[in-house]
Image (spheres, helix red, strand yellow):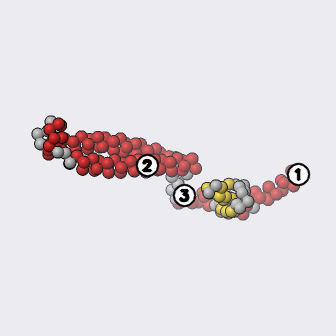
């Protein structure tokens, strides 16, 4: 058996075409696209990928910069960080909308509410309440911005790693 397999493997190792072609199978399982090195279903779609020769990679490396996050693990981690940053940016947007709404609501203070707050006038009560609202939301927004900054630093570190 080994005698039959060894020449075939030797021929495949020598053949440049065999080294360049990569076969990937795409299957849809429960509505989710799945990729595999082996057929994963009867209706598997065969995708042929061309792998560049090592000589091409070496010559191209001299002319181009290394891809940030070249490893698959780094790429996946960077994608997670980008999603987390987008989630935080959405949180900031929601905080700003809430701040605008709360500030508008603060402008509806009447004289009775101003008296209970101990303010000299309605304008003073509105200013006091608006300042408190802005301080609270600015602290929340600042905390989320710090988290975004930390995530961006992590992303930068991963991008610089090979």
N-term-proximal mark, 1 vs 3 = 1
Q: Could you tell me how far apart the alpha carbons at marks 3 and 2 are, in whole angstroms?
A: 38 Å
Whether residue 56 appears in this view of the structure is: yes
Q: Which percent across, then down, holds residue 7?
A: 83, 56
Q: Earlier in the sequence, mark 1 or mark 2?
A: 1
Against 142, residue 37 (above or below) is below
- Residue denoted by label 3: 62
Left or right: where 9 falls relative to 78:
right
In front of the other: 148 or 18 = 148
What residue is shown at x 43% (from left), y 49% (from top)? 87
Spatial separation of the CA atoms under disc 1 and disc 3: 45 Å
Instruction: Identify the residue at image location x=34%, y=47%.
Output: 95
Q: Which mark is residue 162?
A: none
Badge 2 marks a residue whose secondary structure is helix
Select label 1 or label 3 by which is in front: 1
Disc 3 or 2, which lies upstream in sequence? 3
Q: Is residue 54 left or right of residue 106?
A: right
Labels 1 & 3 near each other (Cβ < 8 A)? no
Q: Residue at x 28, y 50 (%)?
A: 101
- The x, y position of residue 8, in whole percent, is 82, 57
Task: Specify the label residue 87 is tagged with.
Answer: 2
Q: Alpha-carbon neighbours of circle 2 within 10 Å: few (<14), some, or many (≥20)?
A: few
Residue 23, given in percent of the width and then of the height, sits at 70, 59
Position above or below: 47 against 6: below
Considering depth in this image, is 113 or 129 the residue closer to the camera? 113
Q: CA distance from mark 1 to mark 2?
A: 57 Å
- The number of callouts visible is 3
Q: Which residue is mark 1?
A: 1
Query: Where residue 88 sits in the image (x, y, percent)?
Result: 41, 47
């Amino acid at each position: 058996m080994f005698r039959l397999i060894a020449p075939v493997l030797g021929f495949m190792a020598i053949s440049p075409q065999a080294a360049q072609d990569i076969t990937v199978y795409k299957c849809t399982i429960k509505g989710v696209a799945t990729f595999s090195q082996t057929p994963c279903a009867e209706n598997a779609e065969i995708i042929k990928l061309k792998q560049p020769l090592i000589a091409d990679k070496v010559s191209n490396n001299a002319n181009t910069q290394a891809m940030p996050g070249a490893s698959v693990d780094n790429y996946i981690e960077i994608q997670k960080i980008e999603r987390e940053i987008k989630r935080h940016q959405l949180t900031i947007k929601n905080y700003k909308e809430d701040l605008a709404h709360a500030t508008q609501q603060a402008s509806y203070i009447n004289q009775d509410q101003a008296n209970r707050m101990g303010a000299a006038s309605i304008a003073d009560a509105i200013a006091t309440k608006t300042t408190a609202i802005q301080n609270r939301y600015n602290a929340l927004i600042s905390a989320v911005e710090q988290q975004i900054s930390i995530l961006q630093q992590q992303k930068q570190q991963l991008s610089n790693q090979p």
